[in-house]
Structures are given as structure tokens and as C-alpha cells.
């Protein structure tokens, strides 16, 4: 118990002087050329690829200083939470399965930033970060991981089964959450809610037959469903090039329109989801939405598939390090968005 308390404290508390320096770009006063405070700036989103769509999400978006702080904090907490989870697993305080989300934080943070209170999410077993952004506390997540009654599922679910309001898990069967997500979207439509359901799955699950059944039913019934493939490059230890005849996952819906997104860029993810909400809930028959979408978010995981996979037998350490240095999501947010634009507007 003492070990868990110490690790929780390291996740939740500021890191003293080092932590202050890391957050310095966001904590300093932001001033424009005329000495006025600048709290908002405009940024270009990363280019999107489209399938059966004519208009892409917006090529630029605004980001406020408060939004940037929030996104950065959320991604930092998720990264530190996953680091603590890995340590607890190695100490055998976490048993069973444990799949870490490090490297993919911009996806859940960007999607959550666009979702409204009535929208729903269902995902696979890499769900710790999702549980956090959907409303679970860090203490609740860590307690669940270690099988304690203070956990979000009272210690009964463990790593793969966490839930919150409008968050339907955390599911352990590969791909099985996708048809369930289509069912949630059907419930939204049946009850007359102007709400979407986001169903997430990995590239390793993308060849499952049940996904295509869900696409088909969602299109037939014009459901407000957004199916999102988190393409981190590897299904367990197999690269996408070896596992899939077509690696353009955003086109896999065939008759369902799709979008490819740079999943390491939190603002590009956010804008794509805002676009998806508008698409799925407006226009179309009687103005009730234009049906489902299939999205692919290109990302990368720093750890192996699970804690039992070192993740270095099918890729090199240099490959992982190169992504960390050039594409890491919260480094990009800190370096490009906030420091250069919000932190130094007008040369302040």
C-alpha cells in the first residue's frame, strides 16, 4: 500500500523546480506587440486525407492559452500514469493484462476536447488514458489497476475494464467493442438524441469481420457512429504492412466516408472530431445526420503491445527514439503551439 501511495503521489503532485521549468512556457504572462495579453492564436492543422468526402476538416483552428494548458496537463498526466502503471506491474502490484497508452495521448485528449456531454465513447483494452479523460480520477484508475475497492470498477475489472459516464469501456475481446458502439449509436438515434458514439479499435483489429458488419448496419440505418482506427503501426508484434493487404484504414468502410488524421497532433484530432460531430448529426435525411464515418488516426506506441512484450524484437530502439524526438505529441504541443505562438506572441 505504501508503494502505491508513493507512486500516486509522484503522478499527481508537481515535480518541484523541474516541473515548474517544464511548464514555464504556459505559466508565463503572454503579451502581444502592443503589450496586451494574447490568450488565443491560430494554427494550421496537419493535412487530412479523404475518402468519399469533398470537404476536409478545417485547415486551421484557434487554440486558447487555457485550452493549451489543459491539453498539455492531460497528456502529461496520462504519460506519468502509464509510467507508474509499468512500474507497478514490474513490482507485481498489477496482475493480469496491462496495455500502456504512452505515445498515443493526443488521440484521447484531442477527441475528448471535441466531444459534448451527450456523446459516448467505447474503446479496446488500452484504456487507462481514456478512463482518465472521460472523468475517472487518477486515484480511481490506479486503484482499479491494483484490484482495490476504491477503483472505478471496485477493483473487479482491472486494466481492461474501466467505465465512466458515457464511457462504455475498456473491452478485452479484440474488435468486439465496435458493434457494441454501433448499438450505442442506434440507441442515440432511437431516443432522438443529437449525440454520436465514438468506437475505437487498433490496426490489429481492423481486419475483423465484425467491424465490417458494424459499418454495414451503421450505413443502412444512417447511425451517428464514428469508427476510429488507432493505427500505431503494429498489431501486437506484426507491422501493418505484413498484416493488411490495404493499410489505408480510413477507406475500409468502402461506402462509408473516411478521413486520415495525424494522430500525434492534438489540434488536428480535435478538429477532425468536431467535423465528425457536425457530419453525423446535421444534414442528411430530415436533418438528422449524414450517417457514419471511418477515421484513421496515425500514431505510435512507445511500449510493447502489453507488459509481456518488450517491443524491441520487431522494431529497433532507434525507431522508437526517433519518434520520441520528432513526433512526440506533448513535445509538439509545447514546442510549436504554446511556446512559439501563445508564449512568444509579438516577441514578448
Image (cartoon, rainbow, N blue to C red):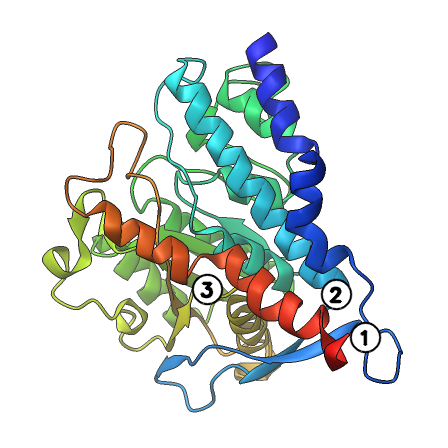
Q: Residue at x 21, y 54 (%)?
A: 209
Q: Are marks 1 and 2 in contact (CB under 8 Å)?
A: yes
> For mark 2, what is the residue?
65
Circle on res. 226: 3
- Describe residue 253's horizontal placement relative to residue 11 as left or right: left
> For mark 1, what is the residue?
38
Q: Are marks 1 and 3 in contact (CB under 8 Å)?
A: no
Q: Residue at x 42, y 28 (%)?
A: 86
Q: Earlier in the sequence, mark 1 or mark 3?
A: 1
Residue 291 locus on image (x, y percent): 46, 74
Under tag 3, what secondary structure? strand
| Mark 1 and mark 2: Cα distance apart in space | 8 Å
| Mark 1 and mark 3: Cα distance apart in space | 35 Å
User: Disc 1 or disc 3, which is closer to the eye?
Assistant: 1
Of 338 and 238, the residue lying toward us: 338
- Describe residue 89's horizontal placement relative to residue 347 as left or right: left
Of 228 and 237, the residue lying toward us: 237
Residue 220 locus on image (x, y percent): 37, 71
Residue 79 locus on image (x, y percent): 51, 41
Q: Earlier in the sequence, mark 2 or mark 3?
A: 2
Q: Residue at x 61, y 69 (%)?
A: 337
Mark 1 is surrounded, within 10 Å at the Cα level, by few (under 14), some (14 to 19) or many (20 or more) other residues, namely many
- Does residue 118 show up? no
Mark 2 is surrounded, within 10 Å at the Cα level, by few (under 14), some (14 to 19) or many (20 or more) other residues, namely many
Q: Is residue 51 above or below residue 68?
A: below
Image quadrant where residue 126 sits: top left
Return the residue found at the far bottom.
54
Amino acid at each position: 500500500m505504501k508503494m502505491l501511495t508513493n507512486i500516486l503521489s509522484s503522478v499527481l503532485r508537481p515535480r518541484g523546480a523541474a516541473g515548474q521549468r517544464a511548464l514555464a512556457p504556459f505559466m508565463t504572462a503572454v503579451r502581444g506587440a502592443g503589450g496586451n495579453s494574447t490568450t488565443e492564436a491560430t494554427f494550421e492543422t496537419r493535412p487530412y486525407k479523404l475518402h468519399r468526402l469533398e470537404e476536409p476538416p478545417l485547415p486551421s483552428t484557434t487554440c486558447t492559452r487555457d485550452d493549451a494548458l489543459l491539453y498539455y496537463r492531460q497528456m502529461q498526466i496520462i504519460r506519468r500514469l502509464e509510467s507508474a502503471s509499468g512500474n507497478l506491474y514490474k513490482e507485481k502490484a498489477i496482475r493480469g493484462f496491462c496495455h500502456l497508452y504512452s505515445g498515443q495521448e493526443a488521440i484521447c485528449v484531442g477527441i475528448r476536447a471535441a466531444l459534448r456531454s451527450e456523446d459516448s465513447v467505447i474503446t479496446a483494452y488500452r484504456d487507462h488514458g481514456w478512463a482518465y479523460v472521460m472523468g475517472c480520477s487518477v486515484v480511481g484508475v490506479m486503484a482499479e489497476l491494483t484490484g482495490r475497492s476504491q477503483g472505478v470498477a471496485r477493483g473487479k475489472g482491472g486494466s481492461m475494464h474501466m467505465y465512466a459516464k458515457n464511457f462504455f469501456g475498456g473491452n478485452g475481446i479484440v474488435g468486439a467493442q465496435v458493434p457494441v458502439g454501433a448499438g450505442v449509436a442506434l440507441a442515440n438515434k432511437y431516443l432522438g438524441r443529437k449525440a454520436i458514439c465514438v468506437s475505437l479499435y487498433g490496426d490489429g483489429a481492423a481486419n475483423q469481420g465484425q467491424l465490417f458488419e458494424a459499418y454495414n448496419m451503421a450505413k443502412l440505418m444512417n447511425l451517428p457512429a464514428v469508427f476510429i482506427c488507432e493505427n500505431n503501426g503494429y498489431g501486437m508484434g506484426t507491422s501493418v504492412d505484413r498484416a493488411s493487404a490495404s493499410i489505408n484504414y480510413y477507406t475500409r468502410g468502402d461506402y462509408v466516408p473516411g478521413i486520415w488524421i495525424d494522430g500525434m497532433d492534438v489540434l488536428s484530432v480535435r478538429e477532425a472530431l468536431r467535423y465528425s460531430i457536425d457530419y453525423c448529426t446535421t444534414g442528411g435525411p430530415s436533418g438528422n445526420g449524414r450517417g457514419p464515418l471511418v477515421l484513421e488516426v496515425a500514431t505510435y506506441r512507445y511500449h510493447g503491445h502489453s507488459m509481456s512484450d518488450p517491443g524491441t524484437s520487431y522494431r529497433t530502439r532507434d525507431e522508437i527514439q526517433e519518434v520520441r524526438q520528432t513526433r512526440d505529441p506533448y513535445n509538439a504541443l509545447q514546442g510549436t503551439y504554446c511556446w512559439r505562438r501563445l508564449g512568444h506572441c509579438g516577441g514578448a
